[in-house]
Image: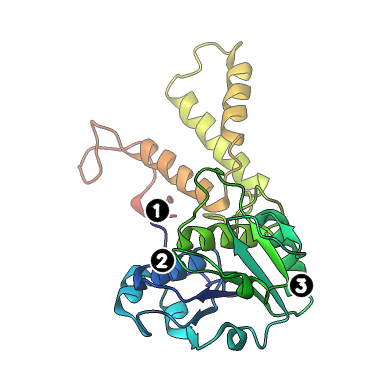
Amino acid sequence: MAGSNSKREMLTEGPIVILVEPQLGENIGMVARAMANFGLSELRLVAPRDGWPNEKAVSAASKADHIIEGTVVYDTLREAIADVNFVMATTARERDGHKPVQGPVTAAKDMRARHNKGERVALLFGRERIGLRNDEVGLADELVTFPVNPAFASLNIAQAVLLMSYEWLKTGLASETDIPHEVRSFEPAPKHLLHGFLDQIEEALDVRGYFRSEKKKPAVVDNLRAVLTRPAFSSEEVHFLRGVISSLDRFSRSAPKGSSGPGLGGSDEDDEGKI
C-alpha cells in the first residue's frame, strides 16, 4: 500500500524493538519498514549473522532510513537491555515458567501505560528459525503471544513486529476506530457562505425555468437544500462550487468563453472556484 508523505510529521516514539541474532538482512529491513509504518523508531540488533550495516536491509526497508541509520548493534542480549526498565518477549509457543503471558492488545496497552510514566520499554523478538531460547526468555519481564492457528503458529519476524507495532499505535488513538491523521481536516463552512451558495443555485435554476410549477417550487427548493447541506462543505469547497455555477451562468455552448457572442452576465475577473 503506497502512502508515504514527507510533508507530514514523522511519528517516532514507542518501545525499543530488539532482534536477537537476526539472520537475513531483508528481514531486518522489513522490520524497519513495519516499525516506520506504525511510529516506532528505535531498533537494536543482537549479533546479526551477516553483520551490520547491511545493504539488503537498506533496500528492504523501503526508505525507513531514520530507523536503519539509528540501528545499534550489541554483542549480547544483556547488553541490549541494560538501560531498559521493562522487557516484553514475543513467543509463538507455550513456555514453562512463571512469567505472565498477555495477548497483543493488552500487552500494547500495558506498554503504553509504562511508556507514559517514563519507563524505557522494549519488545524482544527471536531468530527467524527457532525464536528465543529459554534463557533469553528468562531475561524478560513478561511474555506476549499471538492468537494464531495452533497448527501453523510460526510468524515471519517482520509480521510479528508489524502486528505489535500496529497494536502499539492503536493505544495512542482516541478510539480503536480512529485514525492517526485524517486525509484532510477542515471546519464546515459558516452558514452565511453556504446559504449564499444555495441562493445562487436557486436563482440560476429559476432563470433557466427549472421550477415549472410555482406551487411545487418550495418543496423542490427544500429537497435541493437538504441534498446540498448534507456533506458539510468547507469554505474552500463552497467557493469552488460557486465558481462552477458562475461559469455556467456566464458561458454557454452558443457563447463559449473567448467568443464575441454575449454571455449571461459577469466577467472573467469574477471567477471563483479555486481550491
Q: Name the element at disc 3.
A: helix
Q: Determine which residue is flagged by label 2.
A: 30
| Lower sequence index among marks 3 and 2 | 2
Q: Determine which residue is flagged by label 3.
A: 114
Mark 3 to mark 2: distance in Å?
27 Å
Q: Residue at x 35, y 80 (%)?
A: 50
Question: Which of 117 and 258 lies nearest the eye of the viewer?
Answer: 117
Q: Residue at x 57, y 63 (%)?
A: 165
Q: Which dot, 1 or 2, sits closer to the camera? A: 2
Q: Position of residue 46 (x, y in %)?
A: 50, 81
Mark 1 to mark 3: distance in Å?
32 Å
| Lower sequence index among marks 1 and 2 | 1
Q: Position of residue 199 (x, y in %)?
A: 57, 35
Q: Residue at x 36, y 36 (%)?
A: 264
Question: Which of 44 and 265 lies nearest the eye of the viewer?
Answer: 44
Q: Is 242 positioned to the left or the right of 263 in the image?
A: right
Q: Are marks 1 and 3 in contact (CB under 8 Å)?
A: no
In the depicted structure, whether residue 186 falls above or below residue 52:
above
Q: Determine which residue is flagged by label 1.
A: 1
Amino acid residing under circle 1:
Met
Q: Are marks 1 and 2 in contact (CB under 8 Å)?
A: no
| Lower sequence index among marks 1 and 3 | 1
Q: Residue at x 44, y 63 (%)?
A: 129
Q: Position of residue 158 (x, y in %)?
A: 46, 62
Q: Name the element at disc 2.
A: helix
Question: Which of 94 and 218 lies nearest the eye of the viewer?
Answer: 94
